[in-house]
Every structure is written in C-alpha cells, then in structure tokens.
Image (tube, helix red, strand yellow):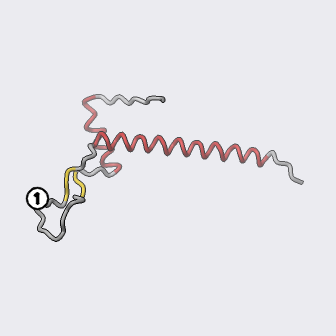
C-alpha cells in the first residue's frame, strides 16, 4: 500500500489544524448522546454536550483522506468519460 506523508512545521501545526477544523466544521464539543432531556442539565451529571472524542488532528486526517478519495473518483469518472467519448466518435454508423 502506498503511503502519503505530509510534513507540517511544528510552528504551523496549530494553524493548519485550526484552519481545517474551521473549514470543515469540527466542533470542540458535540451533543451528548446520553443527555436526558427529562432531567435538568448539569455539567457533571447530565451535560447537554461532551468533549468531541475526535481530535482536530484525527478530523483533519479524515478530511484529507476524503478529499483524496473524491479527487481520485472524479479523475476516474473523467477518464472513463473520455474513453467513451473517443469510442463514440470512432463509431461509424451510417
């Protein structure tokens, strides 16, 4: 399996991760799936939100992978379209 490595200078890491988090909508907190609406909200026993278990770094990596997959898929689709276009142009029906 091929490996793609992206090196980000340490002094730019936070800037890059925050930029991707803002661009793609990472939230520091998420709705608490165990929140009981029948009880009063309490930050320690019944919080409405909890810390996001997916770190900004994990989120950024997932978005980069999604982007690569989408671009590869789009490239394949365009390639197939070109192949069929050429085949259609060379089809001599009279």
Residue 60 position, x and y percent, is 34, 42
Query: Viewed as shown, does residue 15 lie left or right of 74?
Result: left
Picture coordinates of residue 32, whole percent (x, y):
22, 58
Q: In the displayed structure, does residue 18 sit left or right of residue 76? A: left
The residue under the point 61% across, 45% down is 78
Please name whichever residue, 18 or 30, is drawn nearer the observer in this view of the structure. 30
Q: Is residue 35 left or right of residue 8?
A: left
Rendered location of residue 94, percent (x, y): 89, 54
Spot the residue most to the bottom. Answer: 38
- Secondary element type, mark 1: loop
Say above or below: 44 vs 17: below
- Alpha-carbon neighbours of circle 1 within 10 Å: few (<14), some, or many (≥20)? few
Residue 79, compared with residue 35, is above or below; it is above
On the image, the x and y values in percent for residue 76 come to 59, 42
Q: Which residue is mark 1?
A: 45
Which of the 4 quarters of the picture holds residue 50? bottom left
Residue 3: quarter of image: top left
Q: Total label count?
A: 1
Residue at x 25% of width, y 47% of height:
53
Residue at point 27% right, 38% down?
15
Of residues 39 and 84, the one nearer the viewer is: 39
């Amino acid at each position: 399996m091929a490996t793609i490595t992206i090196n980000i200078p340490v002094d730019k890491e936070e800037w890059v991760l925050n930029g991707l988090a803002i661009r793609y909508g990472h939230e520091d907190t998420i709705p608490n799936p165990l929140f009981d609406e029948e009880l009063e909200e309490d930050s320690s026993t019944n919080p409405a939100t909890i810390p996001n278990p997916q770190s900004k770094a994990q989120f950024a990596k997932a978005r980069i992978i999604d982007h690569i997959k989408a671009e590869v898929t789009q490239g394949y689709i365009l390639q197939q379209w070109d192949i069929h276009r050429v085949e259609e142009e060379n089809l001599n029906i009279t």
